[in-house]
Image (cartoon, grey):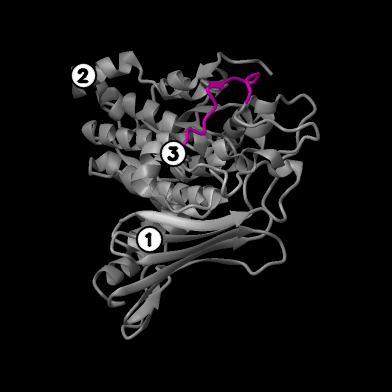
Amino acid sequence: MANTMPLTRRRFLGRSASVAAAAAAGPAVLARSVHAAGSDEIRVALIGCGGRGVGAAANCLSVPGNMKLVAVADAFEGPARSAAERLAAQYGEKVDVPPERILTGFDGYQRAIESDVDLVLLVTPPGFRPAQYRAAVEAGKHVFMEKPVCVDAPGYRSVMESNRLADEKNLKVVVGLQSRHDPQNIETIKRIHDGALGETTHLTAHRNMGWLWVRERQPDDTEMQYQMRNWYYFIWLSGDQIVEMHVHHLDRINWAMRDQHPVKANGMGGREVRKGPQHGQIYDHQFVEFTYADGIQLFSQNRMMPNCWNASSQIVYGTKGSSSCTGSISGENAWRYDGPRVNATEEAHVNLVRAIREDTPRNEGYYGADSSFTAVLGRMATYSGQEVHWDDAVAGGPDELPPVLAWDADPPVLPDEAGCYEHAVPTPGMYRAY
């Protein structure tokens, strides 16, 4: 596999001087980037060509109207070519991705953003999200980005800065927390906000499940290539299970709490079952007690072990009843949703394209960042065994991204002589949250 130009973290996160100059020149310079001038065609670039990336592109191309995928990018060549071929076979003329716009390597995302597109789909491993989001916004592109949108404090701060820049440029941003696009959830949360449950007393959230995929090391993999293929199991790429998977439930709870985020957290966790070399350095179970500014507490579980009790839920408990936030309320004001149903994953793209075409405000990056960092806060608490505070964590949380991104560069953790990463698993009482 061809090596690409090494990227330092500074360069990966740094601003493009040319784009910054264009932004300073005013909206006219960016007009073509914001939307196809004189045309109703929306030109799309897909960045991240795994299963979820291909799914996001399919969701986008299925939106009624003149949508066209014109570029794909992935760190690896195989997934990029496969995505272009699969989507072309399914969507025909809606896909126009010639070989020169099948882009690979760590800098492929930048070349895709520069490929005369209006909308960028960011579906790479989450550790790359902040830098890629910043590059897209600086270039004046509308954005769909998968959850989570950050895995550490520098990433959170970067995303919040990019959100403000997106507002300045009137860009539309949608995050893959699709529950917020589901009418039954929207109506349920509205009723909670209107007092159907009375005063909130406490909250619970669960993401307990069995095994997930693993990808075996290939004979010619460098360590960077292996970790990129098996990205879920490394903190710098996924943020751990609580960030990558449990963020959906934490987001619904934050939404029910009127988009507040917790102000502190404490918890415990570890790994008991997923301890092989293929399982990297992340935990397989965590319990976190989050506290919001008004003192209300959220009791949160996430676990990934086979043959155990499974649950995927969030519940708001109040003085008059309770609700799962997904279409029903129990108690004094019992209610069940009976309105129209949608595929929320598809509806997110419908709403994004509508906002672009109608030029209506939509920037989901703020709650996307807060919900993602809620999960990061929980991870900090379980890793350290300490009570951690939001403001301190945002200001001083560690930088998880490696200093250089290249196939022959070292990622943040390396295996021992046996090929295991147990020595790199965070130890409560020793790990410093900030």
Distance of mark 2 from mark 3, alpha carbons?
32 Å
Residue at (46, 39) in percent of width and height: 152
Q: Earlier in the sequence, mark 1 or mark 3?
A: 1
SS at circle 3: loop
Residue 10 location, x and y as percent? Answer: 44, 20
Residue 202 location, x and y as percent? Answer: 38, 71
Q: Compare residues 175 and 157 and report the one nearer the observer.
A: 157
Residue at (28, 40) in percent of width and height: 357
Residue at (33, 29) in percent of width and height: 137
Q: Compare residues 345 and 195 and report the one nearer the observer.
A: 195
Residue at (56, 49) in percent of width and height: 429
Q: Earlier in the sequence, mark 2 or mark 3?
A: 2
Q: Is residue 350 left or right of residue 307?
A: left
Q: Which mark is residue 24?
A: 2
Which range is magenta?
Answer: 397-410
Which amino acid type corresponds to the residue marked 1 in the rendered image? Thr
